Amino acid sequence: MRVAAVIPAAGLGRRMRQDTPKTYLHLAGKPILIHTLEVFERVPEVHEVLVVVHPEDLEFCQEEVIDAYPLKKVLRLVPGGKERQDSVYHALKVLWKQAKELDIILVHDGVRPLVDPVQVGKVVAAARRYGGAILGIPCQDTLKRVNPKGEVLGTVDRRELWQIQTPQAFRAALLWRAYQQAMERGFYATDEAALVEALGESVVVVPGSPLNLKITTPDDLKIAEAILAAGLIK
């Protein structure tokens, strides 16, 4: 059975205060997106990759980014939608045509280039066993509920709280069913796990790493540069 990865990379990166979409900004001499895709080239459990990009970027991404690097697993580029969830759904519709061949589908943010390939494999294995699995790390900081005036309303018990990352992996039929229900109901969530949870299905958490950061601000990019320069990523 085969495993496919969907990489949503259609965001405009407004928080970066850049005209260039954040996935194409350079990190250690290469586009962030290429760092991400190179991780999946090294994950033996993943057989093919679909990259979702802004419709206006299809030609640029193919010719100036994808074709410029020796990537063997990128199956095709898919035009994105209005929201991240729409973009992933577009890719799932492409994959569903061959769903009988697919065992697991995982979704990973294009701007998380420092994910550990070993952890990707662990998420795939957990999804095979349990149906759905996601990466996450326990919350370490004290958490407060704050009202719009900036006043503290109370302290939240963090013992059961985790910061969730990607990749998130699911049995193909389960993820497809979750997306179909969500799109039919107009239910939008911030990750795939929430859509699966809405079906009443359980999802397990695989311990991740603080290094698997999502690059959404200029400071995030500087931190990622420092992590690579320090040799913290193999």
Image: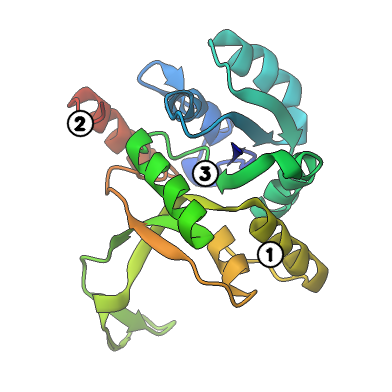
Q: Secondary structure at mark 3?
A: loop
At label 3, which amino acid type do we have? Answer: His
Instruction: Place residue 207 in its image quadrant.
Output: bottom left
Residue at image location 65% in from the left, 39% down from the top = 10
How has the structure been colored for display? Answer: rainbow
Front-lying residue, 168 or 19 = 168
Circle 2 crowding by C-alpha within 10 Å: few under 14, some 14–19, many from 20: few
Residue underneath mark 2: 232
Relative horizontal placement of residue 183, taking residue 146 as reference (left or right)? right
| Distance in Å between CA atoms under marks 2 and 3 | 21 Å
Instruction: Place residue 42 in its image quadrant.
Output: top left
Q: Secondary structure at mark 1?
A: helix
At label 2, which amino acid type do we have? Answer: Leu
* Residue 155 drawn above or below residue 171: below
At label 1, which amino acid type do we have? Answer: Ala
Give the position of the C terminus as an image quadrant.
Answer: top left
Which of disc 3 and disc 2 is earlier in sequence? 3
User: Which numbered marker is on residue 178?
Assistant: 1
User: Which numbered marker is on residue 67?
Assistant: none
Task: Report x, y in % for residue 224.
Answer: 31, 34
Residue underneath mark 3: 108
Task: Report x, y in % for residue 209.
Answer: 28, 48
Give the position of the N terminus as an image quadrant.
Answer: top right
Task: Report x, y in % for residue 92.
Answer: 72, 46
